[in-house]
Image (cartoon, rainbow, N blue to C red):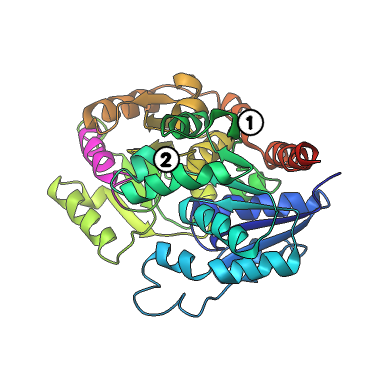
Amino acid sequence: MPRHHIAIFMYSVSGGGVPRRNVTLANGLAAAGRRVDLVVLDGGGDMRGKVDPRVRVIELRGLLTWAPGVRTKRRWQFQTVRRPLARYLARERPDVVLSADNYANLAALAARRIAKSAVPIVVSQRNNASASIAKRPDLVAAIRRDYPLAEAIVAVSEGVAADLVALGLPRDRVRTIYNPVIEGRFQEAAAAPADHPWFGVPGRPLLLGAGRIGPQKDFETLIHAFARLRETRPEARLVILGEGKTPEARPALKRFAETLGVAEAVDLPGRVPDAVPYIARADLFVLSSRWEGLPGVLIEALGCGTPIVSTDCPSGPMEILDGGRFGRLVPVGDAEALADAMAATLAEPVDRDRLKARAELFTTEAAVRTYLALFDGLEARGS
């Protein structure tokens, strides 16, 4: 019998990849006729308006969740909502809970224990754990201890799955389900205008990067590579979309561009409501990350037919680009190799329809179908 009531537990409906992909998944599950709750700590944010009206957004507010000191530490916030989440489980009795990302996964498992509930928990890992939490041995230990208590562990790429198994998690519990990135209105979004004067200027190649400014995305290497590219392509320009964790992140990156003498050709407009129109109008999309899980921006670039250059970081780009068949891959942190790949890609015509066809692996329909098979199979196994 199908799992009719599905709860998706995460931090908020605002911001980056986790909320974007889970809102898309929730909408797809609702369209497939399932009752869906998005259970979050923070119910506000820029993705709220994109939630299907059939999906309930349930905001959990522990007494200490937004207290000074606690609200700046996500792991502490998730600890404060374990009991409110346990009360939700006891009251609403969902058929399955899908949690998303490290602290949410641990909190969901703890809440089930507190509630004395038998609800199946599916934890999902959205990033390469070894790379993203290498300096958090306590978190690595908690993942090793608690994730095996879940009925299933979902990895968003084969690379993330292999990393989880290498950490010691049981291979028979880990399965890969790609994120839903290409949704029904994707081409409509790609056709929308990009609100920036540098896009669509003939004779001025426009390179684009996007993501949270910080160590993971390594935009310094991208800017360094861009400075090398400008030696042979002085007309090129670079736009990097996104903000950092602190207000100083973007100005600091701009100052770095100044030290390399390319500040006038590098713009950092901050965060935009939707990066897809910008990706669709770029001459080249570049991912310079040190690590990932399954970078949705690369899939969006494929869906737009935009040429790609990416670092071969753990995990995701190698899978998305099929070993380099759909975009050049370069070593992490190698500005010279990145610059060479950018120049070669700009000089070479790209079959945009071929890129778009590759993106069909990452549709909402494919993700919904696979998740439903997993959820419904949990009941069959337990019956």
Kindly state the secondary structure of the residue where label 2 is placed.
loop
The vertical placement of 83 against 338, above or below, is: below
Left or right, residue 278 beside residue 116: left
Q: Which residue is mark 2?
A: 202
Q: Which residues are magenta?
A: 214-230
Residue lying furthest front: 116
Q: Foreground residue, 41 or 106? A: 106
Quadrant of the image containing the N terminus: top right
Residue lying furthest right: 1
Q: Position of residue 378 (x, y in %)?
A: 73, 41
Nearer mark to the viewer, of 1 and 2:
1
Residue at the image point whose x is 43% and y is 56% from the top: 196
Q: Foreground residue, 112 or 357? A: 112
Residue 338 visible in rendering:
yes
Would you identify the image quadrant in which residue 287 lies?
A: top left
Q: Amino acid at mark 1?
A: Leu
Q: Residues within 10 Å of mark 1 (few under 14, many from 20)?
A: some
Kindly state the secondary structure of the residue where label 1 is placed.
helix
How much space separates mark 1 and mark 2, taking CA atoms? 32 Å
Left or right, residue 227 beside residue 51: left
Q: Position of residue 144 (x, y in %)?
A: 44, 42
Q: Foreground residue, 229 or 242? A: 242
The vertical placement of 285 against 331, above or below, is: below
Q: Which mark is residue 361?
A: 1
Q: Residues within 10 Å of mark 2 (few under 14, many from 20)?
A: few
Q: Position of residue 87 (x, y in %)?
A: 65, 70
Q: Amino acid at mark 2?
A: Pro
